[in-house]
């Protein structure tokens, strides 16, 4: 099923650490039987409200296909990733 994943990474990470986090998320998705169809890195943006005393974060938006039963496992893995401040997985309708 098609899903959209948005996640925010701490602003204190450098470019190498950001690339490592993105690679880790890609592996999480692949490990749960999913595939990324589109990636959109928004870069560093100001947050609407402070999260864990941070006012900025690196935003990434992914379009992906994932079996419905594996969404919960992906969310659990994202929750355990320290560098990820927030995430949101939303099912999108096939057009």
Image (cartoon, rainbow, N blue to C red):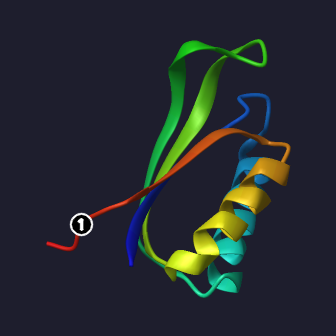
Report the side of 56 relative to 18 (left or right).
Answer: left
The residue closer to the viewer here, 17 or 32, is 32
Is any part of residue 21 visible from this angle? Answer: yes
Q: Is residue 84 above or below residue 32?
A: above
Q: Residue at x 67, y 58 (%)?
A: 75
Is any part of residue 7 visible from this angle? Answer: no
Q: Position of residue 38 (x, y in %)?
A: 38, 68
Which quadrant of the view contains residue 58? top right
Report the side of 27 relative to 70 (left or right).
Answer: right
Q: Position of residue 65 (x, y in %)?
A: 43, 78
The residue closer to the viewer here, 13 or 73, is 73
Q: Give the residue number, with chain letter if any, for mark 1.
A: 93
Where disc 1 sits, the SS reads loop
Q: Residues within 10 Å of mark 1 (few under 14, many from 20)?
A: few
Q: Position of residue 94 (x, y in %)?
A: 21, 73
Residue sitting at the far front: 69
Q: Is residue 6 above or below residue 55?
A: below
Q: Position of residue 70 (x, y in %)?
A: 62, 76
Q: Residue at x 77, y 12 (%)?
A: 53
Which quadrant of the view contains residue 21? bottom right
Report the side of 80 relative to 76 (left or right).
Answer: right
Q: Quadrant of the N terminus?
A: bottom left
Report the label total.
Answer: 1
Q: Residue at x 14, y 72 (%)?
A: 95
Q: Residue at x 85, y 43 (%)?
A: 82
């Amino acid at each position: 099923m098609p899903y959209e994943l948005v996640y925010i990474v701490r602003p204190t990470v450098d470019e190498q650490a950001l690339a490592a986090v993105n690679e880790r998320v890609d592996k999480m998705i692949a490990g749960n039987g999913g595939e990324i169809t589109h990636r959109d890195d928004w870069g560093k943006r100001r947050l609407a409200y402070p999260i864990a005393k941070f006012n900025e974060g690196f935003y990434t938006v992914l379009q992906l296909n994932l079996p419905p039963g594996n969404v919960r496992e992906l969310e659990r893995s994202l929750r355990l990733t320290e560098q990820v401040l927030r995430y949101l997985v939303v099912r999108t309708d096939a057009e």
